[in-house]
Image (tube, rainbow, N blue to C red):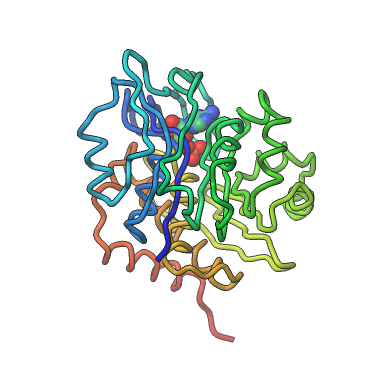
Amino acid sequence: MKDLLTVGTVAFDSIETPYGKAEMVIGGACTYASYAASYFTDRINLVSIVGDDFPKSEMEALEDKGVNLKGLEIKENAKSFFWAGKYHENMNKRDTLTTDLNVLDDFDPVLPDEYKSSKYVMLGNITPELQTQVLDQLDGSQRLIAMDTMNFWMDIAWDELMKVIGRVDILTINDEEARQMSGEYSLVKAANKIHELGPKFIVIKKGEHGALLFGDEQIFYAPALPLSQVYDPTGAGDTFAGGFMGYLAKTDDVTFDNMKRAVIHGSAMASFCVEEFSIKRLKNLRDDEVNSRVMKFKQLTHFDL
Ligand code: AMP
């Protein structure tokens, strides 16, 4: 088992879906990714910033899951990152209503020394400048660096985003964003173009239609688990990424075959995430629930010839 460094937002969200509303609940890319990874490793080094409005009990809950919060800055007299979104009947599409950067505006992350040699790194969704600042502080001994991003940063920080993409091994991105980034509609062509930007592996997340892993001239496809009810898809992509990287950090094997297993573990974690609002479902899972969810994926895709 190796250390996993997670970077991204730790935030408040207000979410509306056809099944209800949740105001000022806990969210943030890094929160989701860290909870998901915590089912595979208790060596998680979190880097983020919150304001003094962020509940202490939520920090303790993360620590109870084995998440090291030495790299979480708590800024006095400041507000945490806030995002509000609304989903429609087709939950693959959502409208962002508000993005308040708040504490992110002048965050200058300083990595604790013990973080610098983390072998696995998940640069979760946050400003590309901050992702770069974190990369610059690593000691160069990393085995695998993954990053996630979204249309928001493509729209306002394209050049900075291209710089950081050129330095990572894996990009995780959703289908619409892969199309926007590459200018290609075909996801195969999009992955090829993104590959030319730097990453050796590309994971394209397709919401309720699963995820595609491109790399080593091979493609692997994992479906999403067909669920009778999706309450809130917020954070599913980050949860996927956290489960994926948590599994790789646990097994310390970066072959394409093991990445396939990691994609399934990430998909299993994402299937829990959407069953409740916010991080509710991810907070208190049992290991046997996680294992049996992974088995469901095996059954879902297994056939004999
Ligand atoms: P996902 O549904 O996987 O895209 O993740 C949603 C989470 O990302 C929410 O909990 C938000 O707090 C967070 N988020 C939304 N917009 C941004 C952004 N522009 N940068 C970083 N995190 C964001």
Q: Which residue is drawn at 48% across and 24% down?
A: 107
Q: Where is residue 147 in the image (x, y as percent from the top left)?
A: 58, 46
Q: Is residue 92 visible from the viewing direction of this image?
A: yes
User: Looking at this view, is 31 or 108 the one in front?
Assistant: 108
Q: Which residue is drawn at 52% across and 61% down?
A: 263
> Across the whole image, how many numbered discs are drawn on residues?
0
Residue 16 sits above or below residue 200 on the image: above
Q: Residue furthest top?
A: 77
Q: Where is residue 31 in the image (x, y as percent from the top left)?
A: 38, 40
Which quadrant is the N terminus positioned in? Answer: bottom left
Q: Residue furthest bottom?
A: 305
Residue 56 sits above or below residue 228 on the image: above
Residue 256 sits above or below residue 305 on the image: above
Q: Which residue is drawn at 62% across and 29% down?
A: 153
Which quadrant is the C terminus positioned in? Answer: bottom right
285 sits left or right of 11 in the view:
left
User: Looking at this view, is 303 or 80 the one in front?
Assistant: 80
Q: Is residue 94 visible from the viewing direction of this image?
A: no
Q: Position of residue 271 (x, y in %)?
A: 41, 53
88 sits left or right of 189 in the view:
left
Q: Where is residue 65 in the image (x, y as percent from the top left)?
A: 27, 50
Classify residue 184 by image quadrant. top right
